[in-house]
Amino acid sequence: MAEQQRLTATPDQRAVLRRAWPHMRDHKRGIVTALGCSAAATLTAVAVPAVIGAGVDQLLERDRAGLMTAVAVLAALAVARLVLFRQAELLLTTVGERVVRRLRDLAVKRLSRAPLRFLEAHPSGDLLRRTTTEIADLANFVRGQLPDVLTVAGYLLFTTVLLLTYSPLLTLVLLVVFVPAIVCVLRLFKRVANPAFAAEAAAAGTVATTYRELVQSREMLQTSGGVGFWRQRFLEDSEHRYRSARRSQRSLFVISLSRVVQGVTTAVLLLVGGWLADEGTISVGAVVVFVLATRQLFDSATQASNLVGQLQLTLVGLARLLDLLDVTSGRLGADDGDPANTDQADKAYEADEADEADDASTHKEFVTAARGPLEVHDVHYSYVTATEVLHGLSLRIAPGERIGLVGPTGAGKTTLAKLVTGLYTPDSGSVSYDGVDLRDLTPRELRTRVVLVPQRVHMIDGTVLENLGLVPGNPDEDRVRTAVAHLGLTDWVAGLDEGLHTRLGGGEGMLSAGELQLVGLVRAALVDPAVLVLDEATADIDPETAHRLEAAIDTLRADRTLIVIAHRESTIARLPRVVRLDEGSVLVRSP
Ligand SMILES: Nc1ncnc2c1ncn2[C@@H]1O[C@H](COP(=O)(O)OP(=O)(O)OP(=O)(O)O)[C@@H](O)[C@H]1O
């Protein structure tokens, strides 16, 4: 199998903010203003013990004017603090929400363009979780805890500086007793919590996958009697998730050791501070400042310990999201190495901007002719299972030619259909249309030149009209009606409850396999492709729908190349050339 980048359940969490920077840099000014405001707000809080300390000294010296000034400053600080904190919170959440929105949009865009092989290689629940729950967690963190994280970091820094100006010796005592002990506690926590939280996120992804399988395959599970097996698997996944959640909760216990560290530090501080005041080295006011500021320091440390768990979870989620963005950037080859490289992230970011411009210019010139030959040259292909499915397959299909692909189950017909429509790229060899490798066509040109009508046409939750119009160029109702009429399907549409406006609430469940293929054919008619690949439905199709399908295909094929993966004898009989595949090689060509 060709090298392809894969998602990691527990991606590298180092330098996660550096990796996220390309997504934040457009908001540099907002971020700097928000950080500045947050720092100013924190300073107003840090200054309070200093002003109280000064007030105490003035009280002891019976300086009434000085005391009144201290009281006035305290009042001013209280007002400034209120305003600045609110403003900082507002600025931070605004800029944070913008960054999160960008990440969410990018993740959805990149996933929608991700190669089919990539999507097949990853559990859908995991992809879903990375792009929904984990982004929602990130948004909640930005709204709820990010301002606190910055405030706490500011407190710790500014309070240390303040204390140093009062008594370097006492500050040193505080730092020597407090910092190493608290660092040990936090390190231990990180060691225990990192894998625990990452495992919890991965286990939640597995539960989502299993649940999604039930929803998608409910009919099959009920008819085959496989519900019991599925339930057993769900219970096991759920149990695993429960255990991993317990493990990450248990890891939070480590952080409560910080309270012991605080108690010991206060005792040592009181001892040394009392002795220094007794010696006359520092004033009583300075001791008051130390007592109040150290309290603030501890409160910040306690708050930090509560926030660390949340921050940890958010960083794991962010790392998993960035992993998804790196792997699906589509511009990074397998040899590009470390996805944490900011240059690469920058390139991918610029590529996305360029893609956006490409999408906007819908009239960009196509490089291939409206009708041309399709050539498959020495194609090899393997799935993630690493067993090669196609072994050096070559085939040339002239413009307007009609061929049938036949062969036993598992011969590789559907795989070939996905290769010639550019849904898969070959491990080696090439597939070209009009002499241009499909990989060199823009998605829009590719989807216009070669169209696949799969065995089971997928529908979105919406009206028939919306489903028929899922093609490049967003066709309006008139164009859809014209295409329907062109294929002779007006009476079929009229027979639906509300015609084109019938809502397909349950997605494709409301239409039969044959009707779903009719939808696929209308989509193809709206595109006017050069090559139409039809993977014939294997399900029983009622004679009326079968007749409609045949008539629509006859109308559509006109001067187009038609490749039919034929399952019915009647179809094979109607095709002038048949290619028989067996175990990934062309066995027989007829005539
Ligand atoms: N997504 C996938 N992941 C792994 N293996 C796959 C995948 N899709 C198909 N295969 C395997 O590749 C081989 C070829 O499958 P393919 O669906 O192309 O055959 P086919 O000729 O179309 O069969 P059928 O007539 O039953 O549709 C089979 O062995 C199949 O199990």
Image (cartoon, rainbow, N blue to C red):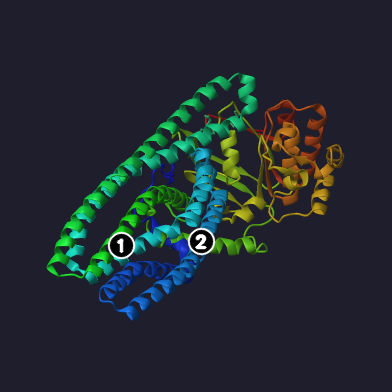
Place of residue 468 in the rendered image (x, y in percent of width and height, measured from the top left): 74, 46
Q: Nearer the viewer, residue 11 or 515?
A: 11
View quadrant of ligand 1: top right
Instruction: Say which of 438 and 119 sits in front.
Output: 119
The local crowd at label 1, few if under 14, some if 14 to 19, many if 20 or more residues have their Cα within 10 Å, is some
| Residue 520, quarter of the rendered image | top right
Instruction: Tell me: is circle 1 under 8 Å from ligand 1.
Output: no
In the picture provided, is 179 more to the left or to the right than 521? left
Nearest to viewer (mark 2 / mark 1) = 1
Of the numbered discs in the image, which one, if any, rests on residue 292? 1
The residue drawn where x is 72% and y is 37% is 517
Query: As drawn, which residue projects farthest toward the left?
Result: 279
Report the disc number at residue 93.
2
Question: Label 1 is placed on what type of residue?
Answer: Leu
Q: Amino acid at mark 2?
A: Thr
Q: Is residue 510 left or right of residue 7?
A: right
Residue 417 location in percent, x, y? 60, 39
The answer to whether mark 2 is within 8 Å of ligand 1 is: no
* Residue 23 shows in the view: yes
